[in-house]
Image (tube, rainbow, N blue to C red):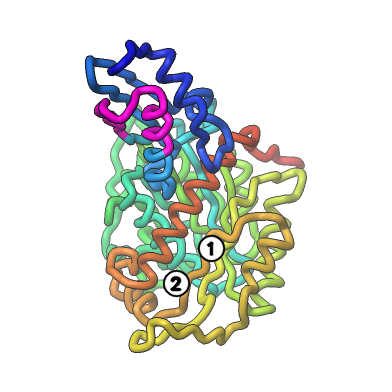
Amino acid sequence: MSMKLTQPDILKALSTVDDPDLKRDLVSLGMIKDIVLTENKISFTVVLTTPACPLKEKIRKDCEEAIRKIAGSEVDIDIRMTSAVTSLRDNAQLLTGVKNIIAVASGKGGVGKSTVTTNLAVALAQSGAKVGLIDADIFGPSIPVMFNCEREQPEVKVVNGKNIIVPLEQYGVKLISIGFLAPPESAVIWRGPMASSALKQFISDADWGELDYLLIDLPPGTSDIHLTLVQTVPVTGAVIVTTPQKVALADAMKGVAMFKQPQINVPVLGVVENMAYFTPEELPDNKYFIFGKDGGKNLADKFGVPLLGQIPLVQSIRESGDSGLPAVMKEGLTAVAFRNLAENLARQVAIRNANFVSTSKVEIVT
C-alpha cells in the first residue's frame, strides 16, 4: 500500500456504496464486518440482507471500485459475501426463531397458488435460505403431492408434557400440511373453527426451529383461515397470485384489499402473475397470451405494489407438480422464472423490513 490505510479509511470509502434496493450506504446499514488490513491486502465481509440477493455482484464490484480509489491497483482486495436475512419479529411470542412469515394468497382457486408457493419455497432454499412451508389450504391441500410425500406423516414428540409436531423435510424445505392428517382418498369435512384450530396448532405446536422465511399457503378467497393467521402471528407481508384473466383479477383485487384493510394492515409484498402466457416446449421463444396479457402487471400498478414475476404456462410445470419434483429443480424457462421470483420476493422482504414498522398481530374484536 502506498499509504498506510486504517479501518476508518476503509469505512469512509465504503460509505459511498449504496445498497441499490434500500437506497442507503452499506456502512450505515451495518453490512460491513471483519475489516482486516495487512501490508498489501485489504479484506472485509459484506453481509447481504438475503442469500437470494440478485445484486450480489453489483455490490461486490461497487465495493472494489470504492477501495481501489483510495488503495490503488496493486493492493489485493478480498471481499467475502455472506448474508443474514433481516427481520422485524424480534419480540415475537410465537415462532420466535422465524424471521419472516409470508402469506401466499389468491382471490380464487385454480390460479396455481400452491404451485407458485412450492417453487418459491424450493428456490429460496436453493439460494441458501432456511425455509418452512405451512399448507393451510384446508379444502385442497396439494403441497404433499407437489413435494412427493403424500403418504408420509410428521413425527410427534413430547416436550414438557406437550405434544409437538416435527415438520417433514423435503428438498431443503420444512413442511406441515393439513393433507398429512388424513389419507388422500378420504374426504375431510372441516368446519371453519376446526380448520382455524388446525392452523393455530401448526403455528404454536410445531418445532420450526430457525427459519429465514415461513411461507403460508392459504385457501383461495378471504376466509376464517386468513383472519386466524393474522390474529395468531404478526405477518411480514402477503403475496397475491393471479392469472391474467379478468375474472381472476377481480377476485385477486379482493385479496389485496383484505390485507390492506386498516384493521389488518399486512404489507402486500407484490403480485405474481401465473400462467402469464403459454410457451410450447418445442417453440421456447413463442408466447401465446391465451388468458389475456399483463393482467397481473395492471393489478400491481393499480395498487402500487411490485409485480414479483410472470410465470409462463408450460406443460412441464403441471407434470412437475404431479410427479412431486418441483419445476425449479429442473433446468429451463420455468426454473429461471421461479428463481427470479424468489430473488424479487427476498428483495421486497428486505426493503419492507428496512422501511416499515413491524406488523402487529390483529386484535380480535368481539
> As rendered, which of 191 and 112 lies closer to the eye?
112
Q: Residue at x 66, y 55 (%)?
A: 305
Relative vertical location of residue 19 with respect to residue 317 in this rendering, above or below: above
Relative vertical location of residue 271 with respect to residue 71 in this rendering, above or below: below
Q: Which residues are magenta?
A: 62-80
> As rendered, which of 100 and 331 lies closer to the eye?
331
> As rendered, which of 223 and 210 lies closer to the eye?
210
Quarter of the figure with the C terminus: top right
Could you say whether the residue bearing mark 2 is in a helix, strand or loop?
loop
Q: What residue is disc 2 on? A: 187
Label ID, residue 304: none
Q: Is residue 268 left or right of residue 162?
A: right
Q: Amino acid at mark 1?
A: Trp
Is any part of residue 322 visible from this angle? yes
Q: Position of residue 351 (x, y in %)?
A: 56, 41
* 10 Å crowding of disc 2: few (<14), some (14-19), many (20+): few
Cβ atoms under marks 2 and 1 closer than 8 Å: no
Quarter of the figure with the N terminus: top left
Q: Position of residue 364 (x, y in %)?
A: 70, 40
The answer to whether residue 65 is magenta is yes
Q: Residue at x 68, y 68 (%)?
A: 298
Q: Residue at x 52, y 68 (%)?
A: 310
Gap between marks 2 and 1, in whole Å?
9 Å
Q: Position of residue 327 (x, y in %)?
A: 34, 69
* 10 Å crowding of disc 1: few (<14), some (14-19), many (20+): few
Q: What residue is disc 1 on? A: 190
